Amino acid sequence: MAKKTRKTIRTIPQDRTPIPEQAPADRIRNFEEVALGYREEDARNEAERCLLCPDPACVGACPVSIHIPGFIERITENDYRGAYDIIADANLLPAICGRVCPQEDQCECVCPVGDTLEPVAIGRLERWIGDLAIAEDWHNTPYIGPSGFKIGIVGSGPAGMACAADMAKAGCKVTIFEALHQPGGVLRYGIPEFRLPKKVIDAEIENLKRLGVEIECNTLIGRLFTLEQMLGEMGFHAIFIATGAGYPSFMGIEGESLHGVLSANELLTRCNLMGASEFPSHDTPLELGSHVAVIGAGNTAMDAMRVALRSGAEKVSCIYRRTRAESPAREEELHHAEQEGIEFHWLTAPAEILGDEAGRVRAMRCIRMELGEPDESGRRRPIPIEGSEYEFETQTVVYAIGTNANPIIGQTANLELDERGYIHTDESLATSMAGVYAGGDIVTGAATVILAMGAGRKAARSMKSYLGIRDSDVVYQAERRESEGKRFGIDLAERNFARVRVA
Ligand code: FAD
Ligand code: SF4
């Protein structure tokens, strides 16, 4: 085979390949996807921009360590199935992660191409391969010998799914218990259709079921049965808790009990999970009124505002006490919201919500802010400007100022919690109850999909070690190093295999 010439920053395509998008004027009238995805020629062109670094920084920056240059090289070789196999070794949800991961803070921000040009669009390439796998019905379902262990997973978000996949691959009988009537966690009820279509979630969850994982919806652990019962009479050998942080925060100002005040999670759940956007064909009306004000400027606020716009609000405003520079939302989400005509009121905070005689929201009393010295978060502290209060007309107020731990497990099991109510774990993600592990947002607080998946995989390794199961992840790794060899038929790269005395 002819030796490949090493690529350099000068020889690669200089411009990052753009992703086609629905025009803002069209998309605010529908819930269809905004970013339409690469075509084959786009993906091939972008893949050529990867330098195939011998010591790739992007892999270390990926929370699930996808072998990024490996899959990108397969794209340049026309071996798309090979590219999928490499991604699927580490990531069960490529079409999801390719869409929603903040790659600009992870793999793409350490890519050396970005020192001179725009970094390789790793996320867009991952999405392209993930979508192709769905279209071509590719999946990897290995033969799995049963280990005899029964694993319970509480919560079907990305952390629970990632842990379930690894435990199923280790031969365990895995059941996921989900409180809601459909699986997926925030992927399903939080992130809107125009960023993450439900058919993509369904397809990737199908791969989990192919591994033998059972999902029991409408099952609220802590109410239907407790962790103690699961470990006792129900016969689970280990449990992973991945219940997320979906409990909304409010500010505690006057007027929060008025009709027309809701949390972003409620707005999004009504729309994404209960079909409010299709009212009256779904019996879940969303009475938003003509003007919706969303408090907060993170990713959840962007989603809530863009959903409100698509649900018929004439004007949607963002109320944020700092400036655009301090907004915690992804740049791409802010940009899309601005393109769609959301009004941003920076350096503004609500002081009171005002109602009419019928108990409905009619306005907010807001106060202007200025920025002082940085606070403990490193961002400049917002300080109210005396005498700057004014009335701001709105019919709906949506809170998107953060969330807290989902509390039920903590209230019903004898688990050590931290001072904020999140589950306390050690380094291996073991909780204070033997055999019970926890990870994702319920341990870290609200974070990201890929960090939750990384936690699920880490907990699976710890659970295998606890149960004395061979850590057979390596068996599924397409890019594994051949040099490690075998002893007694067992790959030496495997962890936790039975200790054999050789002398
Ligand atoms: P979750 O996804 O919250 O799943 C927890 C599941 O547990 C839920 O389905 C819940 O119903 C279930 N559950 C809770 N209690 C019980 C119980 N007692 N019994 C049974 N089931 C229970 N991250 C990104 O990376 N990119 C994004 O673009 C992005 N956008 C977001 C948009 C919104 C609106 C929100 C709210 C979050 C977003 N995030 C994003 C964050 C990301 O979705 C979360 O960090 C991630 O989903 C956490 O995963 P998890 O598995 O820990 O929990
Ligand atoms: Fe390719 Fe960038 Fe990863 Fe290097 S760091 S292998 S250039 S994606």
Image: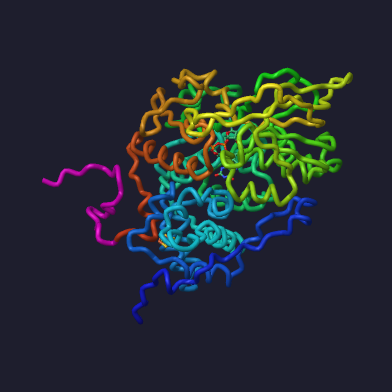
Q: Residue at x 67, y 42 (%)?
A: 303
Q: Position of residue 278 (x, y in %)?
A: 81, 44
Q: Residue at x 75, y 48 (%)?
A: 341
Q: Position of residue 432 (x, y in %)?
A: 40, 23
Location of ligand 2 given as a quarter of the image: bottom left
Camera-nearest residue between 223 and 279: 279
Q: Say whether residue 496 is magenta.
A: yes
Q: Main secondary structure of the magenta part?
A: loop
Q: Is residue 169 left or right of residue 271?
A: left
On the rendered image, what quadrant is the C terminus found in? top left
Q: Residue furthest right?
A: 357
Question: Above or below — where is 414 with respect to 477?
Answer: above
Q: Is residue 216 left or right of residue 3?
A: right
Colour approach in the figure = rainbow
Quadrant hosting residue 291: top right
Q: Residue at x 45, y 59 (%)?
A: 114
Q: Say whether residue 200 is magenta.
A: no
Q: Which residues are magenta?
A: 482-503
Q: Residue at x 26, y 55 (%)?
A: 489
Q: Is residue 148 visible?
A: no
Q: Position of residue 390 (x, y in %)?
A: 76, 26
Tally the marks.
0
Camera-nearest residue between 318 and 287: 318
Q: Position of residue 429 (x, y in %)?
A: 40, 32
